[in-house]
Amino acid sequence: MGPGSVSVIIPCFNCQATIAETLASVAAQTSPPKEVILVDDGSSDRTWELLHELPECHYPRMMILAHPGRQNYGSSMARALGVAHASGEYIAFLDADDLYAPSKLERQLGAFERYPEIVMCHTAVEVIGDLEQAAFYEAAFSGSPESPYWFRRQKDYLVRNRICISSSLVRADVLNRVPFSFVGKQGVEDWLCWSLLAGKGRFLYLPEQLTLYRVHLYSITSRLTQSSIKTKSVAALWEVRLRKLYAGLEYKMVLLARSDTLTHGLRVMGSIAEDLRLILIAYLWNPGSNPDSNATLQPHVLVKLLMLPFRLARYLAGWVGAAWFRR
């Protein structure tokens, strides 16, 4: 059996500065995709016009889509629209500012041939753009097992996302059975997708840097990481911590609503309780208070009472996770 056909799906939002380079990296693939689906997500710059000005002779297998009225629904809904129109055996997601190394799809299709039981293959990344953050992001998207593995059996999968969306290649028939799309605000759509997809089969990580991941100051990911802060003030670091907690809470709430097993749901619920406990602790921190003032912060009795079930839920989640990990 030869390698399967690939549909590359690229959500596009105000990406006029990078989309041409991104498409060129797709066109340069040693295993060319069957089709490239560009989904404009309500861009307010010249992205929509630029997509229609691309020469057909260079991109003969290109499809351009948009939501009704060219509304902006976020990258998750844009990817879902692309998946609904895709005809390839595999789906490759690519953000409009990232790039593929020339052999990226070829290497991943080869991995699916070697391991027909896997449902998704992802790769290591090489950072482009803000190289000061290269070490942080390249480490963040590494460390997964280099043999077929169960994503939900990774002890930290509810804590951090080790999979770069642009590095993924997924079986289309499996992805079509996963309710991964939602309108979110915290940039955790890809993390949710992997967590739901993980209920369908094993993943594979290729340690080669086959995906070029663009880091810039205004990306959603940068706003959630301490590495992007130039001034390491306590207040700035704490703000990033809160953003990360809220992002994790949104991810887990949607994941709980769509969880497929009781065991998994209990583990997610325990993790949600721990996030709520940490958020309460964060708001109890009051660096501007005067210890001699009558207005010093005193935790409400309900807050103290809530801490106990939250702590118990954390232990329950740890027990459920450990039991699952031992399976």
Image (cartoon, grey):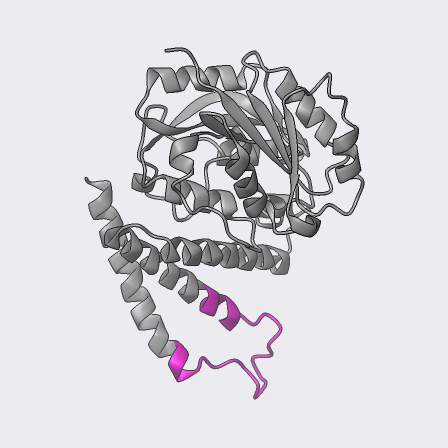
Q: Could you say which quadrant of the image residue 32 lies in?
A: top right
Look at the image and give the residue range highlighted in magenta.
279-303
Q: Is 280 included in the stretch rendered in magenta? A: yes
Magenta: predominant secondary structure element? loop
Residue 69, image x, y percentages? 70, 51
The quadrant in which the C terminus is found is top left
Whether residue 191 is visible here, answered yes or no, is: yes
Q: Is 286 included in the stretch rendered in magenta? A: yes
Residue 43, image x, y percentages? 73, 45
| Relative to 35, residue 298 above or below | below
Residue at left offset 32%, top offset 21%: 116
Which residue is nearer to you in this view: 1 or 228?
A: 1
Whether residue 71 is visible here, answered yes or no, is: no
Residue 141, image x, y percentages? 49, 33
Residue at left offset 40%, top offset 66%: 277
| Relative to 130, residue 74 above or below | below
27 horizontally vs 326: left or right = right
Q: Could you say which quadrant of the image residue 201 lies in?
A: top left
Which residue is nearer to you in this view: 49 or 10?
A: 49
Q: Could you say which quadrant of the image residue 127 lies in?
A: top right
276 horizontally vs 41: left or right = left
The quadrant in which the N terminus is found is top left
121 horizontally vs 133: left or right = left
Residue 164, image x, y percentages? 51, 35
Which residue is nearer to you in this view: 280 or 266?
A: 266
Residue at left offset 77%, top offset 36%: 16
Q: What is the number of callouts on the image?
A: 0
